[in-house]
Image (cartoon, rainbow, N blue to C red):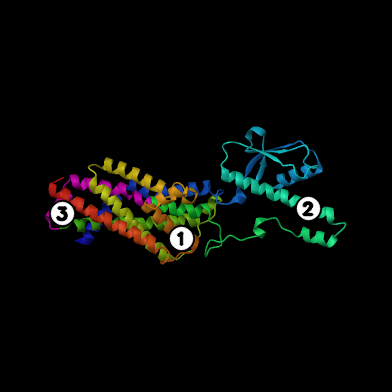
Amino acid sequence: MFSAMIKKELILIMRDKHALLALFIMPAIFILIMSVALRDQFTQNKIVFNINIINNNKSSASKELIKKIKEKNNFKIVKNKQAQFLIIFPKNYKKDNKSKIIISVKSSIKSDLIGIFKAKLAQIIFAQKIKNFENTIKYFMPNQSKSINNLKIDPNSFFIIKYQKNDKIPNATQQSVPSWIVFSMFFIIIPMSTIYINEKKQNTLARLNSMNISIAFMVISKSIPYIIINQLQTWIMILVGIFLVPYFNTPALAINGTISAIMLLSLSLSLSAVGISSLIAVSASSSEQATTIGGILNILLGAIGGIMVPKFIMPESMQKLANISPMSWGLDGFLKIFLQAGDITTIANESLYLTLFGILTLLLSIAILKLKINKGL
């Protein structure tokens, strides 16, 4: 009987081809779009600033510095009106070493980008000052001048950034793939609510209950097919990140953790998604109501949980608020696997929270559905 009910659910799901397309095609498209759109935002080396230069000095020092600026890929010379930053050399730039270059910034530029711009420009200015100092002393102290010439100003010569067991800087693909895996899982509310509402209207659930089939049995049998769908979603999205995303000149997804950790986390996340979808489906009185409530709730949980906007750029108060969203737990778990070479023990907390949340919402679903069937609703 149990296998027959699962088969029934699978047949009903397969009939709703539009919902299935939304569950698989939509997140795949989002992964491609977001990975390509954000590919240059996760590394400072690829950030390009539109600048314009006004040289009131005309000295060899200012001309040499301007030449160095133009050679850098981070700076693009544009017209004054299009410039994000206007670099102005004062008249006394060469004569007075204490004189400062004036930088005019558009008011719409964020403070973090201004900091990156200043760091990139300071790197060029500092390198030139070291070169000038070397030229000044090389006739008097040639050995010392050679030592100065060996100084490297590149920040990569001073330190190496490592993310725990992974020495690669996170990229847009590693952020986008887990985000949309999590988001797509919770959209099973669309087909699940349609089937629930139709069976309630046709009294199918009431007839099954009259055949001594328990409500818990019915809810569990309806949940298993969606858990299977969620697992397919997970691996299809991962394959998109590994094989399809690189065709768009974007880094491929790098899985640094264990496959067993991905399987455990995806099962826990699926249980959570199925639980909240069941709760909405049995509580709603129409498929339109369930779809609307489910869609709004998913968007809110995604926005709070770091799906729409990465948590690391949120203010601290929003990061704390994000912890109430099950999507945040799932996303944190996937990021630990992809970026920090996580294993089962690493994502144990996230999996536990998601499992408990899923069990709680499924128990509430069973209680509400039993109440409605007993009342004939």
- Amino acid marked by disc 1: Lys
Is 108 placed left or right of 62 in the picture?
left
Q: Residue at x 43, y 65 (%)?
A: 346
Disc 1 versus disc 3: nearer the observer: 1
Label disc, if present, on residue 336 of the rendered structure: 1
Q: Please tell me which of labels 1 and 2 falls first in the chain.
A: 2
- Amino acid marked by disc 3: Leu
Badge 2: few (under 14), some or many (20 or more) residues near its Cα, within 10 Å? some
Residue 236 horizontal/vertical position (percent): 42, 56
* Cβ atoms at labels 1 and 3 below 8 Å apart: no
Residue 339 horizontal/vertical position (percent): 49, 60
Q: What residue sits right under mark 2 in the picture?
A: 131
The residues bearing labels 2 and 3 have C-alpha atoms spaced at a distance of: 85 Å
Is 27 placed left or right of 74 in the picture?
left
Q: Please tell me which of labels 2 and 3 falls first in the chain.
A: 2
Is 353 placed left or right of 30 in the picture?
left
Q: Residue at x 47, y 47 (%)?
A: 315
Q: Nearer the viewer, residue 99 or 167?
A: 99
Most frequent secondary structure within the magenta stretch: helix
**Circle 3: element type:** helix
Decide whether residue 193 is among the magenta residues.
Answer: yes
* Cβ atoms at labels 2 and 3 below 8 Å apart: no
Residue 220 visible in the snapshot: yes
Residue 219 horizontal/vertical position (percent): 23, 55
Decide whether residue 89 is among the magenta residues.
Answer: no
- The region drawn magenta spans 184-212
**Circle 1: element type:** helix
Badge 3: few (under 14), some or many (20 or more) residues near its Cα, within 10 Å? few
Q: What residue sits right under mark 3 in the picture?
A: 208
- Amino acid marked by disc 2: Lys
Residue 284 position by quadrant: top left
